[in-house]
Amino acid sequence: RRAAFAALRSEPPVTRDGDRITLLVNAGLRDDAAALDLTGADGIGLFRTEFQFLVSSTLPSRERQQRLYREVLDVAGDRPVVFRTVDIGGDKALPYLATGDHEEENPAMGWRALRLALTREGLMKAQARALIEAAAGRTLRVMFPMVSEPWEFEQARELFERQRDWVASRGRKLPLEILYGAMLEVPALAETLDLLFPRLDFLSIGTNDLTQFLFAADRAHPQLALRYDWLSPAILRFLRRVVRATRDAGIPVTVCGEMGGRSLEAMALLGLGIDRLSITPAAVGPIKAMIHSLDRAAITATMERMLAAPPADMRAALTAWASDNGV
Ligand code: PEP
Ligand code: MG
């Protein structure tokens, strides 16, 4: 099977009825960028910039950050790279970064990601400048993690725009353009998407955190890991609503959580109208094989039917459908 997946490398992910799906990879370190060539993916849909911070024993300097971002962009060439600003704090605490002496009881819901970055402005400014200078002469795509309300996105975007002006004032070369995205992983944001859309270039759904917050279930807890299913009506209906809203607004939407890297789940996502998946590199071959075997119109009708009157066991029903339909 590995050899079969490798043979798919240069084949585009197209469904049986001709829909071109965009398959991107999740990455976090410079060497991960090599996955682009190994898998034949369309780009990097989620570059987790905090990895560099997590493997370092001191705060990475702006120069070091910039070097990493430029190397990744060089490897990617014409393929897009979406840089996510640091998602640190909470359970990804950095020993060298003082985050106050409050012991967090619920670090996943704590002072992390964009919440931390908007308070520790120096950190965010350095990263913004590193990204802007690294992307000189190219398109820069940035996205902010854990956006809960539109003002947080707005504030982060403004911080980046100010750094862009600063870089320009020094006579340095700028990115051709900066595209700004938000991660949808806090359910509350779904209720205010209409307020966000006018300022937003793209949306990316982080189903790892989204699931944990929708079900109020710790994503790392072994007792809960098997209890809540990505293929539950609650999640699928939620995602369907978001997909419809983005479609009406003409905003591209990607799923970048682990859900998209599993065949049955990815099949369901395509049935909900998701055209873009960012997944772990090892999943590209299997997901592409699934896409090749799938009739998009058929899964779309099936998801519509199953979500109108959900079967008691959604996973079993979708497994049976896949096997009956040669997926
Ligand atoms: C997510 O939450 O789904 C996500 C992609 O981000 P991370 O797994 O890095 O929290
Ligand atoms: Mg997340």
Image: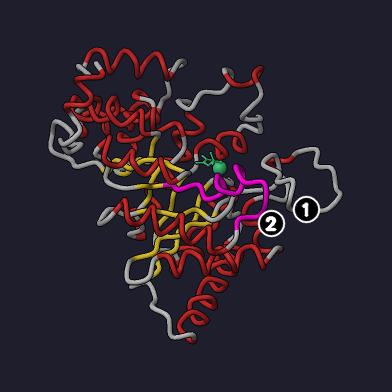
Q: CA distance from mark 1 to mark 2?
A: 8 Å
Q: Which residue is mark 1?
A: 99
In the image, taking residue 253 as reference, residue 110 lies left or right, namely right
Q: Secondary structure at mark 2?
A: helix
Residue at disc 1, CB closer than 8 Å to ligand 1: no
Residue 116 location in percent, x, y? 69, 56
Residue 259 location in percent, x, y? 44, 31
Asked if marks 1 and 2 touch (Cβ < 8 Å), the reply is yes
Q: Quadrant of the C terminus?
A: top left
Q: Is residue 52 magenta?
A: yes
Q: Is residue 163 above or below residue 184?
A: below
Residue at disc 2, CB closer than 8 Å to ligand 2: no
Q: What amino acid type should be assigned to the residue bearing mark 2?
A: Leu
**Which mark lies nearer to you, 1 or 2?**
1
**N-terminal-most mark, 1 or 2:** 1
Q: Residue at x 48, y 76 (%)?
A: 164
Q: What amino acid type should be assigned to the residue bearing mark 1?
A: Thr
Q: Nearer the viewer, residue 58 or 174?
A: 58
Graded by Cα atoms within 10 Å as few (under 14), some (14 to 19) or many (20 or more), the crowding at tag 1 reads: some
Q: Residue at x 64, y 19 (%)?
A: 222
Q: Is residue 288 above or below residue 196?
A: above
In the image, taking residue 210 as reference, residue 293 lies left or right, namely left
Read off the magenta span.
46-60
Q: Which residue is mark 2?
A: 116
